[in-house]
Image (cartoon, grey):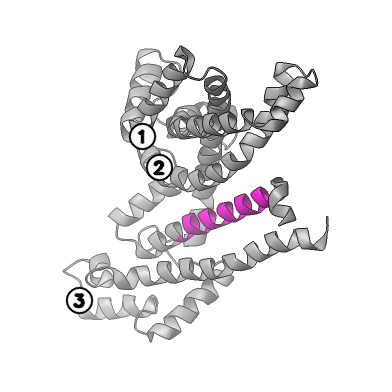
Amino acid sequence: MKPSALWKPTRRILLTLPVLWVVVSVVFLLIHLVPGDPIVQMLGEGATASDIDALRHSYGLDAPLGQQYAHYWHGILHADLGQSLRLHDSVTRLVAQRYPYTLALTLAALLIGIAAAVPAGVLSALHRSRWQDRTLGVVSLVGLSFPNFALGPILILLFSIRLGWLPVSTAGTGPIFGQDFLLHLLLPAITLGLSLAAILTRMVRTAMLEELSQDYIRTARAKGLTENQVVYRHALRNALIPVLTVVGLQFGSLLAGAIVTETIFSWPGIGRLTLSAISNRDYALVQGCILTVGLTYVAVNLLTDVAYTLANPRLRLE
């Protein structure tokens, strides 16, 4: 690959550095923007002044703001996010224990969404304005308007309680990526993935319709290629390039939706840990969870941006 082709991905990586700084700074200011005194909220109204001062000193909140900011950056660079007040454990360790579960749930939902959307979008484009297209359009609209907190309980009632095919709760999922783990993963992943599939189906349909009207498609058909070769080797390959950007952007929506889904299915991920930390007023743990989600979102968007640049020849030639 020419050096000029590598410049654009490198430039995007460099442009991500200010975004990372903003994310870390906002998470740091979170504890200072909370109304009231977070230390008093942690200890309760009955805490003595000496207890409040001691806890404030242990968190370093009695130091100047600039010194606190430098200390926070030092902790991040050394993978030290502080101590959880309620759980009496390292925030880094707690987040590291829960993060693989959220990542597995999000990736599984992403795979389900793509696996359902690509065939549906292609079928809808190939049968434009016919009953197949109208039916898939209605299904996509229902999927877009159906929230996770409503779909999740319905799936539990149907597949767990009525049919007994899948476990009701994900409590005690066992070792990650084991057979028991995959059974518990299925329902929450479907809950997240169906909403994504509804969005991607419309995107694939629109992109396919645009590609099928291009001159190179007519040339491929004139050369005697089969319809499957024209549709799947040429049209679909180019149609998935803009869809790649949408997939990356929707990854952040999956992370946000995972908070609700993890609560519904008792999934031991970052989202459920965040809600527990908020309810317990464990601000160090809240900061660690939000920072992890924010950095993950930035990293995925960066990878998507670089992959889109590498996959699209026109951007490489600019």
Real-space CA distance between mark 3 and mark 1, rounded to the nearest whole angstrom: 43 Å
What is the magenta range?
A: 291-309
Q: Position of residue 203 (x, y in %)?
A: 51, 35
> Dot 1 lies on which element?
helix
Residue found at x 78% / y 62% = 4
Q: Which of the marked residues, 2 or 1, is nearer the chain's N terminus?
A: 1
Residue 242 position, x and y percent, is 59, 42
- Residue labelled with disc 2: 257
In-image side of 73 versus 56 (left or right): right
**Residue type at tag 1:** Asn
Q: Give coordinates of residue 76: x percent, y percent.
A: 54, 69
Q: Residues within 10 Å of mark 3 (few under 14, many from 20)?
A: few
Task: State how far apart marks 2 and 3 are (Cα).
Answer: 40 Å
In this rendering, is residue 3 above or below 102? below
Which mark is drawn over residue 48?
3
Q: Of tags 2 and 3, which is closer to the observer?
A: 2
Q: Amino acid at mark 2?
A: Gly
**If the image is split into quadrants, where does the C terminus sit?**
bottom right
Q: Are marks 2 and 1 in contact (CB under 8 Å)?
A: yes
Q: Residue furthest left?
A: 46
Callout 2 environment at 10 Å: few (<14), some (14 to 19), or many (20+)? some
Residue 209 visible to an observer of this rendering: yes
**Residue on which the image places disc 1:** 148
Secondary structure under tag 3 reads: loop
- What residue appears at the point 32 percent right and 79 percent down from the top-left corner? 54
Query: Which residue is pictured at 46% across the width and 42% down the height?
Result: 254
Q: Where residue 15 sits in the image (x, y, percent)?
A: 59, 67
